Amino acid sequence: MVVSIISFLIAITILILTPGFDTALVLRTSAVNGWRKAAMTALGINMGCLVWGTAVGFGLGALLLASELAYNLIKIAGAAYLLWLGLGLLWRPRSVLVAPQADTHRRRGYGAFFMKGFLGNLLNPKVGVFYISFLPQFIPADASVALWSIAMATTHVVIGLSWSAVLIASTHYFAGHLRRPAVMKVMDRLTGLVFIGFAASLALSRR
């Protein structure tokens, strides 16, 4: 059991540190919208992981392996969502921030950032397939699959949020420079291209 736990911690830490859509989204949100909304985005991303881990633990994730239709439907929805985010950043890059006093829907705003991260992971069937193939390797024989899957997904969330905090802190240090109008436009467009690239990769992926 100890070997399984240590092996899982090493593997999941390497996975989290590998740059991907989650990293790009947190960095961009932190630089442009501030650390609070970046924290909500990171929370949404990790809650998506927790939902996938729970689904796998109770056998629901196996539907992605058993049903080509279910996998493709989620894949198309996820790719379309990433494409929509990417195109929005390309067409409407921001050059100024809305003043806090003008934000009359602050609560809804934070919820929107949470949902952006949450849907980004929830609509990615590759996360579910990854959990299905990854988590069982570290579950001891005769142990509860559901409990271990949820426990490992929770561990993934804790480490993921810790890494997100590091990313947010690093961008906060350079926030003044990153929020210059010209820099914001370039950052939005580059992030948009990255999101479109992830959308294409997801749409063309196979199980």
Image: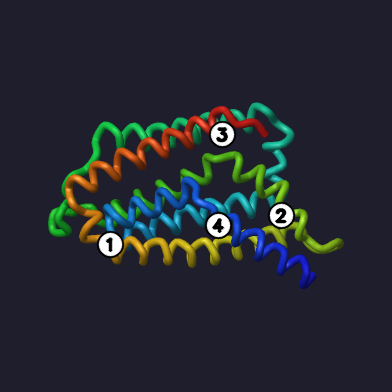
Residue 114 drawn at (x, y percent)? 40, 53
Sequence-earlier tag: 2 or 3: 3
- Residue 135, disc: 2
Q: For the residue labelled by badge 3, is the local secondary structure a helix, a strand or a loop?
A: helix
Q: CA distance from mark 2 to mark 3?
A: 21 Å
Check disc 4 and report the residue beneath it. 16
Q: Which of the 4 quarters of the picture holds residue 196? A: top left
Q: Residues within 10 Å of mark 4 (few under 14, many from 20)?
A: some
For residue 134, above or below residue 9: above
Sequence-earlier tag: 3 or 1: 3
Q: CA distance from mark 4 to mark 1?
A: 23 Å
- Are the residues flagged by discs 2 and 4 in contact, CB closer than 8 Å? no
**Marks 2, 1: nearer the viewer:** 1
For residue 207, above or below residue 132: above
- Are the residues flagged by discs 3 and 4 in contact, CB closer than 8 Å? no
The amino acid type of the residue labelled 4 equals: Ile
- Residue 74, disc: 3
**Marks 2, 4: nearer the viewer:** 4
Q: For the residue labelled by badge 1, is the local secondary structure a helix, a strand or a loop?
A: loop
**Marks 3, 1: nearer the viewer:** 1
Name which residue lies at 40% across and 46% down.
116
Name which residue lies at 63% across and 59% down.
12
- Are the residues flagged by discs 2 and 1 in contact, CB closer than 8 Å? no
Residue 177 horizontal side relative to residue 42, left or right:
left
- State the quadrant of the N terminus: bottom right
**Marks 2, 3: nearer the viewer:** 2
Sequence-earlier tag: 2 or 1: 2
Q: For the residue labelled by badge 2, is the local secondary structure a helix, a strand or a loop?
A: helix
Residue 81 horizontal side relative to residue 151, left or right:
left
Check disc 1 and report the residue beneath it. 174
The amino acid type of the residue labelled 2 equals: Leu
